[in-house]
Amino acid sequence: MSETTSEWSASAPRSTPGPTISFSFNLGKIPDQGEDSDPILRDGPDLGLVAVFDGMGGAGGTVYETPDGRRTGAYLASRVARDVVERRMLELLEPDWNLNGKAAASDLQRSVQRALRQRLEELKAPPSGLRSRLLRALPTTMALVALQRTQSGGPAWACHVLWAGDSRAYVFEPAGARQLTTDDLRDPGDALANLRRDSVVSNAMSADTEFHVNYRKVVLQAPFLVVCATDGCFGYVRTPMHFEHLVLSHLEAARSTEAWSSALQAEITAVTGDDAAMSVLGVGAGLREFQKLFEPRVTELARDYIAPLDELSNAVGRAEQEFKALQSRQLGETAQIWSRYKPEYERYLRPQPLTDEEKDQEQDEPAVREASAQAEQRSAGDDQTGPVAELSEPASDQRPTDTDEPIVPEGSEAIGESDRQRSEEISS
Amino acid sequence: MAAPRGLSYAVDIVFCIDVTGSMTPIIDQVKSNALRFYDDVQSNLTAKGKNVDQLRVKVIAFRDFVADGAAALDESPFFTLPGERASFSDFVSGLIAEGGGDAPESGLEAVALAIDSPWTTTGDRRRQVIVVWTDQPAQPLDASVLPADLSSRVPADFSALTDVWEDEQGPMGSSSKRLILFAPDGPGWSDISGVWENVVHNPSQAGGGLSEVDYGTIIDSIGNSV
C-alpha cells in the first residue's frame, strides 16, 4: 500500500478493513505546464476522499501573467478549484455524520465560483476581444468521490459522487468497472459514443459562466476500488473495456502499489494526447487480495472483450495495408501495361520519318507554293499581302480527298489501303 | 494482446479570404496569417503528443457576386500538408485584391461553400475548421446572383445556412467543427457569432489588431480541445 495521510481517526472497532491501498498521479504532456491539478487523495478508517480536476485547455487557453510566470486559465483554474474543494470537503465530511450530498454540491458550486471569480479579478487581465460560447475564463472540470462507511465495522459504504464536466469517477468491483458520473456534454451519448464523438463540454466550473455541481449517491459493498480520472486517462483508449483492462491488467502483475501506479502511468503516457490525472483508493482488501479478487475479471476481460476487439482491429489494419498495397500495385501495373499498349495506340501521333515519295514531294512544294502565292496576290489586289498568301495554302489535313493521294498529316505515315477500306466501310 | 496505440487525428482547415479591392492594404498580412495559421495549429497538436495523421488545407477566395459575377469566387482543392505545401503557398500568393464594388461582400456564400467542402472522414478524431478573413459585412444570401453551378451548394437564406451549420447530420461533424471569424462587427458576422455554436469571433478588419493572447486562445480552442 502507498500509505496515505489519515485526516480522520475513528475509535470504533472494525471487522472489515477500510481504505487499504491508494495512489495518485498527475502527468503533464508538457513539463510544468500540465493543466490538470494534482488529485485529491485522503482516507481514514471510515472515510475516503478522491478527486481530480482537469483545467480545460481548449476553452481556457488564455494566458495570464502570474508571479510564477505565464499560465493558462486552465492551469490556474484546476488548482484553485482543487484547493477550495479539498478544504470544503474536509470540513463537510465527518465520520459520524451522514454527508448531505445535495447541500455539499451547492456548497462546492458557491465556494469554487467565488474563488475563481476572485482569482480572475486578481489577475487583472485585459478584457478579451473574442466572442465565443466555446471560451470560458478559468474553466476546469471536477470528479469527486466521498466515501463514508454506513455502519461501524460493516462492509457497506455510502459513495457520494460530485462532478462537473467530463472527468469521471468509477468503481471497480470484482464483477466489473462501473462509471459513477455522467459526462456533461453538449451532445451526450454512452461511454463508447463519447469516446468517438469528442463533444464539447456543456457544464464546467468557471469564473464567467454559470455552472452546477452534479450529485449522485450509491451504496457500495467492500471490497472495491474507487477511481477518479481526467479524460487524458480514459479518453484515448479504443473502448471503455480497454480502459478497465488497462487499469486491472497492471494490478495483476504489480509487486507493489507503487509498481502498479508506475506501470499505469507508463501505459497512459504512451497513448494519451492530453494531460492525465488519476486517483485510486482501494477499500476492504489489501493488494494481494485485490489481485486475487480481480484475477477472474482480468481473464474474462482479455478473453471476451479485448482479444476479439483487438483481433478485429488488427484485421482491419491488415486489410487497410493490403488495400494500400493493392492500390499501389494497381497503379504500377496499370502504368506497365499501358506502356506496352501505348506505342501502337499512339502510332499516328508521333512524328514519323518521311517516305521517299514524301521527300520528293517536299522538294517540289516550294515551287508550287510560290506559283500559288503569285496567283493569289494577283486576284486579291495590292493591299493584301503575306497573310493572305499563307492562308491560301491548304493545311496538310485539309487536302482534298478526291485525289488518289492518301490523307497524310504532316510528318505522319500514310494510311494503308486496308485502313482506308475499313474507314469506308464504317462511314458507309 | 495488441500494443497500446494512441488515437489518430485528421485536421481540415478551409480559409475563406476576402480578396476585394478594399483588402489591398492588408491582403499580404492576411496571406501570411493563413500560411502561419496551419503551422500554429500543427504545433499546438504535436506539442501535446497528438499524432496528426492527416492535415489538409483549402482556400476559398471571395469577392461580391453582385459586382463581380463568376469572378467572385476562386476555390482551391484540399492540399495535403506538408507534401503539397508549395501548391498551397502558390495558391495563396497568387491571390490579388481587386473588384468587389461597394460593401458588403459575398462572405456568407464563401462560408456556405466551405461548409459544403469534402471534409475528411479518416482519423479517430477530426477537427474541421473554417477561418474567415474579411474587412466588410456580408451580403444577405441571394440565390439569384449566383452562377448556376453554385446555387445548389448555397442555402437560400441565413436561416437555412444556420440549419446547415447546426445540423448534427450535416456535412461537418457536430463536435469537430469550428468557425473562426476575423471579421467586422456587422451584418452576417455578428449574426453568426450571436447564434451559431462552436464559433470564435474576433470583431476586426480581417484580424487587424488581434493580440497575441487572443490569437493563442483561438489556436488552443482548435488544437487543445480535440
Image: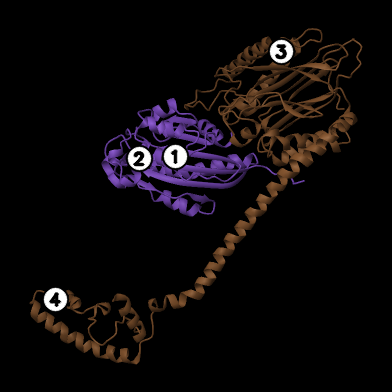
Chain colours: A brown, B purple
Do the dots labelled 2 and 3 sit on one chain?
Answer: no
Going by the numbered disc 1, the residue's amino acid type is: Ile
Query: Would you name the residue on which mark 4 appears?
Result: A385
Figure disc tally: 4
Q: Nearer the viewer, residue A159 or A210?
A: A159
Pick whichever, A238 or A210, lies toward us: A238
Residues tagged 2 and 3 counted as in contact (Cβ below 8 A): no
Q: Is residue A18 above or below residue B149?
A: above
Is disc 1 surrounded by few (<14), some (14 to 19) or many (20+) residues within 10 Å? many
**Residue drawn at (30%, 36%) of the image:** B142
Label drawn at residue B115? 1
Q: Which one is closest to the eye, mark 1 or mark 3?
A: 1
Q: Mark 4 lies on which chain?
A: A
- Location of residue B40 in the rendering, given as x and y in whole percent from the top left corner: 54, 41
What's the chain of the residue with tag 2? Answer: B
Labels 1 and 4 share a subunit: no
Spot occupied by residue B120 in the image (x, y as percentages of width and height): 52, 45
Residue A380 at x, y percent in the picture: 9, 77
Say which amino acid is labelled 4. Answer: Thr
Residue B34 seen from this side = yes
Q: Nearer the viewer, mark 2 or mark 3?
A: 3
- The dot on residue B23 is 2
